[in-house]
Amino acid sequence: MGEMTRGCRVLGHNRSMNQSAPTPVIVVGSVNMDLLFTGLDAIPKPGQTVSSETFRIVPGGKGANQAAAAARLGADVRFVAAIGTDELGDRAWAALESAGVGLEHVTRVAEPTGVAAVVVDKAGENSIIINPGANATVAASQAAAIAELYAGKPAVVLACLEVPIDTVTEWARIAKANDWTFVLNPAPVPAEALPAELLALVTIITPNDTELEQLGSIADLHATGIETVIVTRGGDGADLARVGEEPHHQDVFPTRPVDTTGAGDSFNGALAAAIAEGQDVRDALRFAAATGSLSTRAIGARDGLPTRAEVDELLAR
């Protein structure tokens, strides 16, 4: 059989093949509330004070953004995360619930809810500072019991690095043992090298340009055992590199970006959702690129998240 068919078998599960329920997307990741400063003339330099035109508190966190993006597109999302019992945690929980994210595996803990300070200039570029708070309590010890609920069935696991590395690694082990697709969004890249065991268990890794530089190169990632590397390049689209195949470039879908915050998260959520549907990796990449482009049309990481109908309409043009 051809490469496209083989990729579909490895990277996704086709729901038409006698499945009565959609393949779940298990998102393992962070929850933040974002302190959002927008309309800056420029991102401040060290020692510089600048004024913003607006200030808002909006839901964020890479994991939560990815979960919300996938749910908005119609995926069956099960979120593994931790939220504080504070007022910000209540707001974060309500936002996820309203997005249709499955919260049965989200714990409320005594630590404060994660917070991010986000500054956005008038060109839509951003800079972010994060305090992890409750996100640091997402424990590897909880993974096995949660995963047991989905054992024997297909699943896609999507993880980021705003939760402990040992937790992400444990989920990678579980995904491998269950023949699940494991998608790693390696953000933020830690100062120390990622564990070789984790990298060897990854099905798809999705660094941006900066993260790829920190990790080495596409060839370096292939050498760890990762077959599929997708590099997101902002306004320059994304590149797909699979072992044994010619490189493939996906152009960006033209939009008028208002705020790029969360565009990468929406891309990753959409990629996982498409793979869970059984789309082959090239189609999933195109679907994710369209979702990421549409997500930049509003301020904040989630206000611009598109529906499935909006993505399908853009893809049909």
Image (spheres, grey):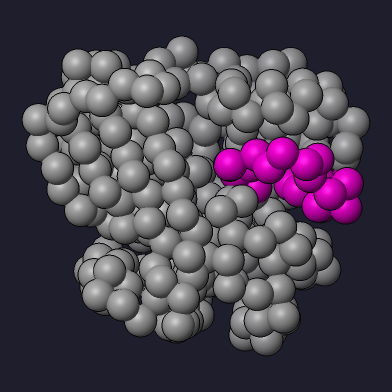
Magenta extent: 184-203
**Residue 72: percent from the left, percent from the top?**
30, 56
Inspect this view and state whether residue 127 appears.
yes
Residue at the spot 75% in from the left edge and 63% down from the top edge: 166
**Residue 199: percent from the left, percent from the top?**
81, 46
Q: With 117 as the anchor, is 94 left or right in this view?
A: left
Q: With 6 as the anchor, is 109 left or right in this view?
A: left
**Residue 226: percent from the left, percent from the top?**
80, 39
107 magenta-colored: no
Q: To which quarter of the image does residue 257 belong?
A: top left
Residue 276 in the image: above or below residue 294: below
Residue at the spot 22% in from the left edge and 24% down from the top edge: 50
How many labels sit on residues?
A: 0
Residue at the spot 57% in from the left edge and 16% down from the top edge: 249
The quarter of the image holding the C terminus is top left
Give 41 or 10, whichever is nearer the viewer: 41
Give 253 or 189, whichever is nearer the viewer: 189
The quarter of the image holding the N terminus is top right
195 magenta-colored: yes
Majority secondary structure in the magenta region: loop
Residue at the spot 58% in from the left edge and 66% down from the top edge: 136
Q: With 100 as the anchor, is 171 left or right in this view?
A: right
Residue 54 in the image: above or below residue 275: above
Residue 123 in the image: above or below residue 110: above
| The furthest residue to the front | 47
Inspect this view and state whether residue 297 appears.
no
**Residue 190: percent from the left, percent from the top?**
68, 42
Q: To which quarter of the image does residue 112 belong?
A: bottom left
